[in-house]
Structures are given as C-alpha cells and as structure tokens.
Amino acid sequence: MKYLPIGRQSFKEIISEDLLYVDKTRQVYELIRRGKLYFFSRPRRFGKSLLISTFRHLFGGEKHLFKELYIGQNTDYNFDTFPVIQFNFAAFGHRVENLEEELSNHIHRFATQFEVEIEKTSLATQFRTLIEGISHKDKPVVLLVDEYDKPIVDFLTEPEKARSNQEILKQFFGPLKELEAQEHVRFLFITGVSKFSKVSLFSDLNNLTDLTIHPLAYDLLGITSEELLLYFDDHIQHASESLKMNHEEILHGIKLWYDGYSYDAETHLYNPFSILNFFDQYQFRNFWFATGTPTFLVNSIRNQGINPKELENKEVSNTFFDKFTLEELDMAGLLFQTGYLTIKKIITEGFDSYYVLDYPNSEVRRSMMHNLMEAFTYKSTSIVSNALIKMERGLKQGDISIFVEQLEVILADISYHLTPKNRQQNKQSAFEMWEGYFHTIIYLLTSYMGFRVATEITKHKGRLDLLAETEEFLYFMEFKLDEPAENAIAQIKDRAYTSAYLNSPKIIHLVGIGFSKEERNVESWETEIWKRE
C-alpha cells in the first residue's frame, strides 16, 4: 500500500519517493498536443500546484520521472527540454502589500539564473526583456503561473487595493500577446480560482483557451470513481476495517461526503484533498471546507440580503462563466469559482444551454449551512454547534421540547442586529425584515440536519412550513406570527397535511409554534401525536 502524499505539491518528490499518484499524464499529453496557451480555473486545494509541478518537470525533459506513467508508456512524447519560468503567486504570502516589487524581484532572479541583463524599467518591459532574452539564448520559454488571482482575491474586502493589484497584473501580463506572436513562448499555463475581467490575459490574449468547462479538462483534476477504485483499493479496505463498515458502506459514505464536483454534469469528481485526508484519518469530516472558512462569502450573502435557498439549483446561462468583475461580484459566480457550488445539470434548449448549480456534496453543504447559521444569527461557532446538535438529537428522540428550546437560543438577540438604522423606517418594515430572517434561519437549521427535512412544502390545500423525518418519527410543523400555537395545530389538521402518510409506520407529531412580533422569538408551542382514524 503506497503512502499518501499529504501536503505534497512536488511531482518529483511524489514520484521519486513512490507515493500514491493518480496518473493524469494522459490528459496532460492531450493538452500539450492540442494547444499551447491555457487558463485553468479550479477551487483551492484541488491539485493545481501539483499539476504546475508536473508541467515543470515534463518540459524540463526529466523523462525518468514519467517512465511508469501513461505519457511515458503510451505516447510518442519526446521529452525535449525547454527553459521553464514559474511564478507562484501563493508563494508571495498572504495579502502581499507591494505586488509590483515582488514581481520585479522574481523577474530579476530569473534573469540572474538565465544570465539575461535587465534594467529597472516598467514591469511590462522587464518581463518582456526576460522572456525575449531567454528565448534568443536558448529556446522558446515555458511559462507557468500558479494562482495568478491571489493578489486580487486576498483583497476582496478592500476594493481599492484589489483594483490596484488588478492593474499591476494587467501590466505584467500585457506583453504576452506580442511575445507569443513572435514565437518566444512554447507553452503557457495559468491557474487561478477566478477569471477576473480587465486583466490583459482575458482581453488581449485572444487565443488563450479557457479550460474551466472545457472537455479537455473535465477530469484533469479531481478523482473519478474509476480512479478511486484503481488507486485507493488498499486504503478503502483499511478504512473498512478501521470503521467496521463493509466495502459498499465505505464507498457510499465517501461518495456522499466528498464526491459531486462536475464541470459537464456527467463526469463526477471526488475532492482530492478531502479523499487523501479521509484515508489518512479514517474519519468522515469536513477537511476541505475547514481549510478556508468563507467568512467573507457568508457575511456578503447576509449583508446583501440574499436568500441562501436561492443559491441552490441556481440556473445560469453560458455568459455566467465569462463575466466576473470586481465592480459586480456575482455571488453565485463567486461560489462556483471558489468550489462551493458546482454544475449539477446542463439544460439544452435549441442552440442555448443553461447550467444548474448546487452544492457538490454533504461536506460542502453542511459546512456552508453551519457557517451561514453563524452569520445570520450573529452567534459564535460553539453556540450554533451546540444548538444544532441538541436540536437534531431531540428530533431523533421524539422530544420536540429540545428542538423548541434551542430554537429560542438561536433566535435570541437577533432583533438587536436588525434594528433600523434609518429612523424613517417604521416598526412594520423592521418586523418584515425580521420575519424574512426567521424563515431563512428555519431553512438553514433544517438544511444542516443529517436526516430528511423540507421547508414550505406545497400540499393540495395549502403549504406546510416544515416536514422533518427521522428513522422513527415524522414532524409536521406549522409556524404562526402573533397567533397561538393551537391555531397552527388546527391548520395542519384542517388542511389534511398528514393524509398522504396514513400508512406510514412512523409516529407522527403535529407541532405548532407561535412567534411574537414584539419579542421576535417563540411565544408558545404545542405538540400532539396524530391519531390515525
């Protein structure tokens, strides 16, 4: 059983130390054979840096590293050596303050390495001189750029700084079109999380192929089901023994938690970071999500008044993938490019295609719901976690009082944060704001739970607020504002919401909860077990 390359991003180290490597050189070969200028967008920790490292050693002519891989055994690739220049923007550090100086320093280090003379002129001139100088002395240059957009993404909360870095990147990449036209560039591969407009890469370099949803890159990164079984068979067996689950149960759990990423709605991918960490620890946990809690994203969703439910099964058009600006940060676009949403379905109507986006798996969905709960309730992680655990346990045990008690904790003090800042805003509009928050919080807390839950279910005589189903119980919940809880119970009965479940073997609870406009919290609640007649 091969050791896992946890935290490793060097292709040479992984191959030389005989660590587990999912062979992607078939896809790499096709990229080199069919083009030479590429942009590739994928979420963080999805293997972009390892892919860049693979290109570096491939164009470095290190044939011995590839002799056991697809490209070495099944292709006619000649492993010619080219000068390779690599810029890793992640290596500049978090929130680099002087991007222009960092880039200039890197250019001059490469100039020393390749013995090219460069004067301290503009950034564009320095970069052009470097590439031309290397090309004239040797061969056309292979240029690899990893996480080009990090200097922008790091400053999304500081628009002026982000725009300044965007302008610097525009100057830096500006000469590429001319350099490529003059045949100074053998191969260009640029990775990032987001495809920002107003960077010369995407406006001037018009023959740059965007691989984000391109067939050449559907499985370039990520782990397919076939690759999981081929490369991780021994690890699956060890996980089965460690967790005392059979083979099918382990595969089902891994699929539920870590599968689901797709860029064509057909090729489904496991998150490589989460898969490696699962087989390292044999625990179903949120590995990928925990490495980059999206505080900026969840707070933006709350502050912009976006209903989180609208981000699920989100339909977008073809142009959605090409429009991304600092001036108009589309939330669905940002969530897609950062990996919190993925393509679940493609709808073709005539000559048009529409894409349906949703959360890829349980890891991302549950973690996002938890973070959104913290943002919308203004509560700490510990308070939210404790409340959610108790609410879920209460419903599993058939004790609705625990659910209601923790709902009161979650709702406490929210109205303080929703106090109108504009004195012209009356009490009615303030209440409507709180009412919207209440429905959002109910949706978030129920979406987080590990059993089947649905909100606002349309029935033939009306709409039920909440239906929750555990192994033993069914809960029909109706909420009332400034009405007694008994009215909610009466509505469930009068509108026969339970009629479709007459033959269900589960115990059915009818739950009515009354909320106060004044208190902005639970005022009364009642429950009774439905008696089948």
Image: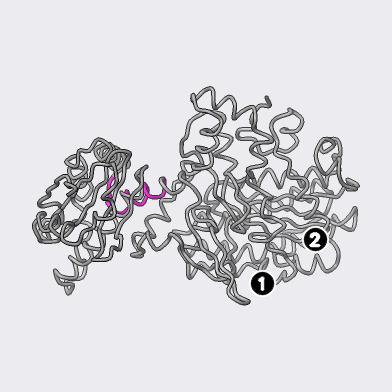
- Asked which secondary structure carries label 1, the reply is helix
Q: Nearer the viewer, residue 199 or 109?
A: 199
Q: Badge 1 local density, few (<14 within 10 Å), some, or many (20+)? A: few
**Exactly how many numbered labels are in the figure?**
2
Magenta part of the chain = 367-379
Q: Give the main secondary structure of the magenta stretch.
A: helix
Residue drawn at the location 82% of the way across and 35% of the way down: 68
Q: Nearer the viewer, residue 492 or 156?
A: 492
State which mark lies toward you, 2 or 1: 2
**Place of residue 34 in the rendered image (x, y in percent of width and height, measured from the top left):** 81, 59
How has the structure been colored for display?
one colour
Is 393 on the left-hand or right-hand side of 328? left
Q: Nearer the viewer, residue 457 or 28?
A: 457
Is 249 a magenta residue?
no
Q: Relative to 124, is 533 above or below? A: above
Residue drawn at the location 70% of the way across and 59% of the way down: 215
Q: Extreme front residue here?
A: 533
**Place of residue 168 in the rendered image (x, y in percent of width and height, measured from the top left):** 62, 63
The amino acid type found where label 2 is placed reads Gly
Badge number at residue 35? 2
Badge number at residue 203? 1
Q: Badge 2 local density, few (<14 within 10 Å), some, or many (20+)? A: few
Q: Earlier in the sequence, mark 2 or mark 1?
A: 2
**Residues under numbered marks 2 and 1 in contact, where contact means CB atoms less than 8 Å apart:** no
Q: Relative to 396, is 351 above or below? A: below
**Place of residue 347 in the rendered image (x, y in percent of width and height, measured from the top left):** 56, 68
- Asked which secondary structure carries label 2, the reply is loop
Badge number at residue 195? none
The quarter of the displayed image where residue 458 is located: bottom left
Is 371 a magenta residue?
yes
Q: CA distance from mark 2 to mark 1?
A: 19 Å
